Amino acid sequence: MAHATSQQPALASGEFMLGDMPVRRMGFGAMRITGPGIWGEPADRNEALAVLKRCIELGINLIDTADSYGPSEDLIAEALYPYPTGLVIATKGGHTRSGPDKWATDGRPEYLRKALEGSLKRLKLEQIDLYQFHRPDPPTPFEESVGALADMQKEGKIRHIGLSNVSVAQLESAQKIAPIISVQNYYHVTGRQSEDVLKACEKANIGFIPYAPLAGDVSKLEKIAKNHNATIFQIGLAWLLQHSPVMLPIPGTGTLKHLEENTAASEIKLTDAEMASFEN
């Protein structure tokens, strides 16, 4: 695998203005620092805390989480509070959990308010930097859910609003209610169903936060990985960074080894021919 050549490899990923907040384009997703099924305590709490602290040392200043990711918000506060200057913590609301690997949606305004208040308390904050609506909830009109976030933004509890798992039409609808600075959708080199949403984000200079492990045909990734003495996951991350200037990858892990491996991908530069090979 490719190893970082600097002490803060995330700096090589470049910077993006997420609203009025400058962030390194390589971030960290806190989903995997919890127990099995994204539920309960991590197998090794000390390593989970060490991973969060190591993020800062590696130059990462965007950490993404959600109230539904087990105790991730508590872990973030335990590891990093009082927070370093410039650290942006993004969290989400709109999912409920009843057990490991069990997910349900709830986009009712009263629920989102309750979820936000819980996140503020766990993260020890008076304002969330980026609060994202986790997923449209079919029984609740989408505009009502976004409207609730807009209300809480006016109250000063949310600095910026983001969306997750949305279509272009939903993004456009939300933009009529409040400024949207980020969209977090399923997306990777072999799964580009949200390409139209990415293009809409590029047009409006909205940060696009891709989530998903690699899937599908990875034969091209394997060939290019050999050229760079890297893993296919590192090449997948490098491709994301070069594919779009608004792309903000947030690879998640619960181990220091994988965190350092993922962040080292910031320094990998794919050739024009390698980038073009993914379009054929």
Image (cartoon, rainbow, N blue to C red):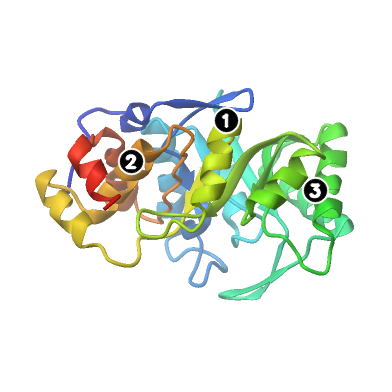
In the rendered image, the vertical position of residue 14 relative to residue 113, given as above or below: above
Q: Amino acid at mark 2?
A: Thr
Amino acid type at image mark 3: Val
In this picture, residue 83 sits left or right of residue 117? left
204 relative position to 191: left or right: right
Mark 3 Cα within 10 Å, few/some/many (few <14, many 20+)? many
Residue depth check, mark 1 versus mark 3: number of the one nearer the observer: 1
Labels 1 & 2 near each other (Cβ < 8 A): no
Which class describes the residues within 10 Å of circle 2: few (<14), some (14-19), or many (20+)? Answer: many
Which residue is the site of mark 2? Answer: 263
Amino acid beneath label 1: Asn
Q: Which residue is mark 3?
A: 146
Residue 271: which quarter of the image? top left
Q: How many labels, in total?
A: 3
Q: Gap in Å between the C-alphas at discs 1 and 2?
A: 24 Å
Query: Where does the image place residue 188, in percent across and percent down from the top left?
Result: 40, 54
Residue occupying image coordinates x 14% and y 43%: 228
User: Considering only order in the chain, which callout, 2 or 3, is on the residue closer to the N terminus?
Assistant: 3
Q: Residue at x 45, y 53 (%)?
A: 48
